[in-house]
Structures are given as structure tokens and as C-alpha cells.
Amino acid sequence: MAIANLLNNKGMLPEKYRTMDRAEMENRIREIKEKLGEKLFIPCHHYQKDEVVQFADSIGDSLQLAQVAAANKKAEHIVFCGVHFMAETADMLTTDEQVVYLPDMRAGCSMADMADIYQTEEAWVQLQQIFGDTLIPLTYVNSTAAIKAFTGRNGGACVTSSNAKKMVKWAFTQKERLFFLPDQHLGRNTTFELGIPLEQMAVWNPISGKLEFEGNVEDIKVVLWKGHCSVHQGFTVENVREVREKYPEMTIIVHPECCRDVVEVSDMNGSTKFIVDTINAAPTGSSWAIGTEMNLVKRIIAEHPDKKIISLNENMCPCLTMNRIDLPHLLWALEIIENGEEGNVIQVDKEVTKEAILSLDRMLTLA
């Protein structure tokens, strides 16, 4: 992340935005959107607050939004309402003439931050010493541009929760073993469902710099980075048990970033798009418990009054880093553009972009 922006006033929300009322902010945002027209594009992730989503030009998951932004050649200014790695991907996929902004530079992703590039490079050296040239790296798109570049220059690719199975199958046509980062749960759930037993999966701990595994290392087929989504790891088997007892008729659908034991006892699991599409297609009167981010679950509930829908864990917090993007920060970013000022720009190094695009392109070509 652009640390310099956090250390000076340019990276902090000006005081005037803290005292404006909601109606005034909304009116100003509408004015700027109308003034800039097609020069402005606001992609918005599913997990954003409704106060921000109302101004979205496109709503979706991270890669989908980056691709939509890249396809929109008329937009000069792309204000990405998501988190840092998403804005990075948008910057890498758009042209040099297009500028990508992140309304709050502090809007990071705890999962992405769990895979530091320096720790990853050190891990790769040690894993090569253990396994030789038998590993191929795959990274979830929920990772930094530097990690995407790492996979690109080492013959690997990116994956999404939607195409993870397809990409894992491809990876095993390239090498004997898989190095999956940064989310151990998506990696574990995907490879297990493709037939690889848990006994053949090891975990790389970047803090200790050691492989966590009991048995013969020659049996290892998958090395999982010890990272996770703080939101999805919050869903538990106990949550599932409670829903089963209280609402036995409910279908439980969860995201594959949830722990393996939660996925195992749920009825269905899949990407954000899969969850949204499944509920959209569900018959009137059906009942659902959804294990994913709370802002999205609340929006799904509001959009489907004909169905009984609850969160799998009704005490679950929304994604706190995603929620840093709010009305004041969105308006601030738009006024920066309107006034021709500089600030909140996401710009990925060209060499990093070149290698990361290799990783993204391998995925986009195959998936």
C-alpha cells in the first residue's frame, strides 16, 4: 500500500467531510457524476455499504469489476469502491491514460496482507530446496500485485473462487505439486473437492518460516499458505448446528473461504457470484442461511422479500476494511477529480504490472 499517503495529510480525510450531513454529500456526488458523465466510472464491490452502492456504475466481485473497468475505454477516472488489491488489478488492466483512485488508501485486505512478497520469496526458496522443481504457484486474486507478479514469473496463475477448480486442474497438468496462496481455506476446499486428501496437504507458516506437516514430505501434493479471510473464518460448525436445530428446512450456502469443517457440513458452497445467482434463482418461499459478508447478506435479504433468508452467523461483522469506503471518502475522491488535484491514486510499478499480467492472462485464457 502507498505508505507515504498514510503519513501525511494528503492521505487523511479532510475535516470538512466529517461534518457534512448525508443529504449534502449525496447531492454533491450526484452533481459530480452528472458533470463528469462518461469520464467517470465507479465500480463497487458486493461487500460495500448501501450508502456507497447507490452510486455504483457496476456492482460485482473484484476481478469482474476490474475487467469491466478495463473494457470501459471512455472512462478517464475510475473510482474503485473496494479494497487496495482490487484497485491495483484495475490499474494493471486499464490503459495508461486511465487513472484509478481508491477513496480511502487505508482500505486494505487482511487476507492479502498475510502474504508479504518478501516472506513469499523466502518461502519459495525453501520450498524449492524441499521439493525441487515440482511446484507451481497459484494465487487467489485477493492478493497484492507483487504476489500476482510472483506467480506470473514462476509459471503460475491467478484464480478466483469461481474458477479455482479449473485453475487447480490446469496447475496439476504443469507440475506435480501446487503452492496455493494466500487463502488456505479456498485452497484446501478446492483441492479436497478435486480428490486430494487432507493428508496430502501441508501448510506453510510465513511467521515461523516452516512447513507444518506430519508425515513424509514426499506425500505432499499441496502446500497452502497460512492465510485466511477474517470475515469468512468467523463462521463455525456451531453456527451450522444452531441453524439446523432452529430452522431444519433451511438450505445452508457458504463461501469457500470458510473453514473446511464448515464447508463440509453446509449444503452448498461457492463464490459470491454463485451465492447471488443461486438465491436469485431460488423459488419463492425457499429458506436460506448464507455464510458470507454481512453487507451483501443484508442486501440479498432486502432484494428477496419472498424468501426467508438469514445470515449463518447473525452476530457477524461486515468486512471492516471494505467499510472504510463510505460517503465522505467517496465524495472526497470525486472532488479531488473535479478540482484537478492529485491524491488517492493507485499506480502499480510497470515491471510488477508486466509480470502480474502474465498471471492474470493465464487465468483469463484458461477460465
Image (cartoon, rainbow, N blue to C red):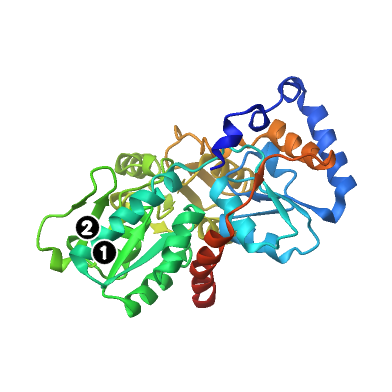
Q: Report the front residue among 93 and 343.
A: 343
User: Which residue bears the numbered disc 2?
Assistant: 202
Q: Note whether residue 161 is visible.
A: no
Where residue 98 appears, as percent x and y from the top left, is: 74, 57
Q: Residue at x 80, y 34 (%)?
A: 26
Q: Residue at x 10, y 63 (%)?
A: 216
- Secondary structure type for disc 2: strand
Q: Note whether residue 156 is visible.
A: yes
Q: Quadrant of residue 280?
A: bottom right
User: Which residue bears the numbered disc 1?
Assistant: 222
Question: Which disc, if any, is residue 284?
Answer: none
- Secondary structure type for disc 1: strand
Q: Residue at x 46, y 64 (%)?
A: 159
Assess disc 1: are there few (<14), some (14-19) or many (≥20) residues with their C-alpha within 10 Å of its C-alpha: many
In the image, what residue type sits under mark 2? Ala
Assess disc 2: are there few (<14), some (14-19) or many (≥20) residues with their C-alpha within 10 Å of its C-alpha: many
- Contact between marks 2 and 1 (CB within 8 A): the answer is yes
Where residue 90 appears, as percent x and y from the top left, is: 63, 57
Q: Quadrant of residue 223?
A: bottom left
